[in-house]
Image (tube, rainbow, N blue to C red):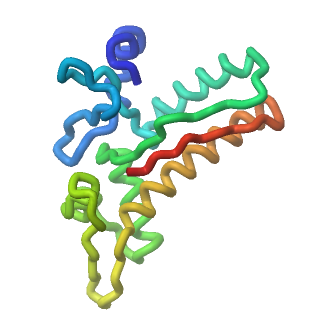
Amino acid sequence: MFATCMFRDVPGSKNWVQVDRKGKPIPYGAAVYARKPTRYLACLNNPSWQRYQKKKVDFILELNPDILMLDNSITNCYCRYCQERFHQYTKKILGKPEDLLSFSEGGFYESGGVEDIKVDETGQMTALVLEDFRLKNIRQYSKNLKRYVQKKKGNILLHHNVHHA
């Protein structure tokens, strides 16, 4: 999201910004000028962001494109929506819900290393659960938009420039 115009024109968009473990907004790293972020990442799990994206897609579809490109779908968010989805995901995968904040204290993205290996009470290793969760979020976001686009226009190519780290 381009902060200056987005925050001005869509005031609620400030609530769509991805946040780090401490609740601070996550800027899009490739768009920092004069030491000030000009763009922020939106949370893919935020329902308001998803509705906004569908409105933008509706506008674009009126132009009858052959292809629709999604870009900058990076997810490293710790907002309440991501925390809830992580609870659901780990309950399904690990048999019990895990807390996103405590599960990810290893600093996976900050260090560029491999996520800490967690061992539950049964001794089962759950390495890279966080990475899998994030990739599945991106995939689900893409699938939902693709279904929406196809329902509106039919067979249109959806290209997704995916980033996950």
Point out residue 123 in the picture as x, y percentages from the top left corner. 30, 90
Toward which corner of the image does residue 37 lie, by quadrant? top left
What residue is drawn where x is 31% and y is 90%? Answer: 122
| Number of marks drawn | 0
What residue is drawn where x is 38% and y is 11%? Answer: 5
Q: Quadrant of the N terminus?
A: top left
| Figure check: 36 above or below 113 | above
What residue is drawn where x is 19% and y is 61%? Answer: 105
Q: Nearer the viewer, residue 104 or 51?
A: 104
What residue is drawn where x is 60% and y is 28%? Answer: 54
| Figure check: 69 above or below 131 | above
Q: Is residue 2 left or right of residue 92?
A: left
Q: Is residue 69 left or right of residue 115?
A: right
Point out residue 50 in the picture as x, y percentages from the top left corner. 52, 33
Point out residue 64 in the picture as x, y percentages from the top left corner. 78, 20
| Figure check: 157 above or below 114 | above
| Figure check: 64 above or below 131 | above
Q: Is residue 142 left or right of residue 164?
A: right
Toward which corner of the image does residue 94 lie, by quadrant? bottom left
